Image (cartoon, rainbow, N blue to C red):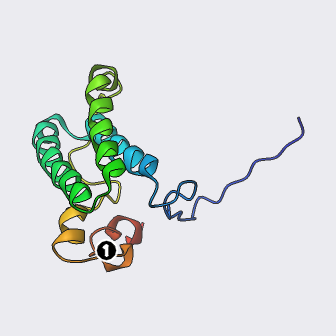
Amino acid sequence: MGYRIGYCPDSTVYHVGGGTLNASNPQKTYLNFRNNLFMLQKNLPIGQLFTVIFIRFWFDFAALLKFILDRKFKDAWAVSRAHQAFFLHIFKNAKKRKNHIPTENKTGQYKKSIITDFYLDKKQKFSDLDQENFFKRFTKKM
């Protein structure tokens, strides 16, 4: 069709966050909780999968209770719906698991818990996180 495609292999792209839905929209709450559960199921090494998801359920339950206490009933329902969707699609998503998941962190994955950093350490922004280890892979001299 005459189009040209180019790319810059040295570029770094940062995802700022969903700009389509307002942060106070319960649909965004639903998608964030659901998609994170799907991502964990598809990408965690099998040895960590059940432990991490079990812990995640308790964090999500705490979030659901917090939404109820804050009278954000639609957000609480969104968390519940996210878990329903997770269980409804658990076998379908199990088929999407990668055959080989590396055991070492080669992706720049944040090794700590963002949830505990946010709620316990009051880190409100991405720039507040301990990024030294997060970006180690990307700053190594090749």
Where residue 6 appears, x then y in whole percent? 73, 52
Above or below residue 108? Residue 99 is above
**Outermost residue, right side:** 2
State which quarter of the image contains the C terminus: bottom left
Q: Amino acid at mark 1?
A: Gln
State which quarter of the image contains the N terminus: top right
**Outermost residue, front side:** 71
Where residue 124 appears, x then y in whole percent? 32, 75
In this picture, residue 15 sits left or right of residue 2? left
**Classed neighbour count for the residue bearing mark 1: other residues with Cα under 10 Å, few (<14), some (14–19), many (≥20):** few
Where residue 118 appears, x then y in whole percent? 24, 70
Total number of numbered discs in the rendering: 1
Q: Residue at x 28, y 48 (%)?
A: 76
Residue under numbered circle 1: 131
In this picture, residue 30 sits left or right of residue 119? right
Q: Nearer the viewer, residue 60 or 54?
A: 60
Q: Residue at x 27, y 39 (%)?
A: 80
Above or below residue 49? Residue 12 is below
Q: Residue at x 35, y 64 (%)?
A: 137
- Asked if residue 21 can be seen in this view, the reply is yes
Q: Secondary structure under badge 1?
A: loop
Q: Nearer the viewer, residue 94 or 80?
A: 80
Where residue 69 appears, x then y in whole percent? 21, 60
- Asked if residue 101 can be seen in this view, the reply is no
Q: Residue at x 16, y 34 (%)?
A: 46
In this picture, residue 12 sits left or right of residue 60? right
